[in-house]
């Protein structure tokens, strides 16, 4: 019972921290407006790690790689801790090597980052679609638009609105669901390493 409580706490704390780092990375990547409370909150809770990491890990073409790397490290730490709390041995057992286990955890961490990214996009598309009907001039609209524009724009170029209804969110959500099936399959395959 104590291990389940620890898993819950780790999953909540490290998972939310990784989510905050990912949101910060994507907000910087899409040049989301910083004049909103979400940006201030994300910067406030992640700066203590991001600033020192930026001194060591340079950015690349406008991407803050240190923030992305920290999100991945948080996921790998979470996965390793959860596996240890569940009783899995992450040492030389049953023919596995430290490199094999570390590689498996690294790949699982990458898959988790991809999965979380897909969920971020999905939630942003759903909230934007709902707000466009309920309150299109909400203060979140510019932030959500900057998140979803790269994905919705590709669909909007190919499929125009039908009867003044934009169906691009529906198609983006379908593609995201298909990609989530792929990531679930990747997780199953990588999990066989343990």
Image (spheres, grey):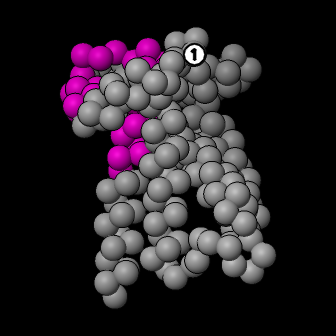
Instruction: Indicate the secondary structure of the residue bearing disc 1.
Output: loop
Q: Residue at x 50, y 74 (%)?
A: 84
The one of 67 and 160 positioned closer to us in this rendering? 67
- x, y percentage for residue 58? 51, 18
The reply to whether the magenta stretch includes residue 30 is yes
Within 10 Å of disc 1 (Cα), the crowding (few <14, some 14-19, many 20+) is few
In the rendered image, is residue 52 in sight?
yes
On the picture, is 179 further left or further right than 50? Answer: right
- x, y percentage for residue 138? 27, 25
Q: Where 174 falls versus 168 (above or below)?
A: below
Span shown in magenta:
16-44
Magenta-drawn stretch, dominant element (helix, strand or loop)? helix
On the picture, is 101 further left or further right than 139? Answer: right
* Number of disc labels: 1
In the rendered image, is residue 128 in sight?
no
The one of 71 and 182 positioned closer to us in this rendering? 71
Q: Where on the picture, by quarter, is residue 105?
A: bottom right
The reply to whether the magenta stretch includes residue 36 is yes
Residue that sits furthest to the bottom in the current view: 1
Q: Residue at x 58, y 11 (%)?
A: 61
- x, y percentage for residue 60? 57, 15
On the picture, is 104 further left or further right than 32? Answer: right
The one of 173 and 52 positioned closer to us in this rendering? 52
Instruction: Give the residue pinned by disc 1.
Output: 60
Q: Quadrant of the N terminus?
A: bottom left
Residue that sits furthest to the top in the current view: 61
- x, y percentage for residue 20? 36, 40
Q: Residue at x 37, y 54 (%)?
A: 14
């Amino acid at each position: 019972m104590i291990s389940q409580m620890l898993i819950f706490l780790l999953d909540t704390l490290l998972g939310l921290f990784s989510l905050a780092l990912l949101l910060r990375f994507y907000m910087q990547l899409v040049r989301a407006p910083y004049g909103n409370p979400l940006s201030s909150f994300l910067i406030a809770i992640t700066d203590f790690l991001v600033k020192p990491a930026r001194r060591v890990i340079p950015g690349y073409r406008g991407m803050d790689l240190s923030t992305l790397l920290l999100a991945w490290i948080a996921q790998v730490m979470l996965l390793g801790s959860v596996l240890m709390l569940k009783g899995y041995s992450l040492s030389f057992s049953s023919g596995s090597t430290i490199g094999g286990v570390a590689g498996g955890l690294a790949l699982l961490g990458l898959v988790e980052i991809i999965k979380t990214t897909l969920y971020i996009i999905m939630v942003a598309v759903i909230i934007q679609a709902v707000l466009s009907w309920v309150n299109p001039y909400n203060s979140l609209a510019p932030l959500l638009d900057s998140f979803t524009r790269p994905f919705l724009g590709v669909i909007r170029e190919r499929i125009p609105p039908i009867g003044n209804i934009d169906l691009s969110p529906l198609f983006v959500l379908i593609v995201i669901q298909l990609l989530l099936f792929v990531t679930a399959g990747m997780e199953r395959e990588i999990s066989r390493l343990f």
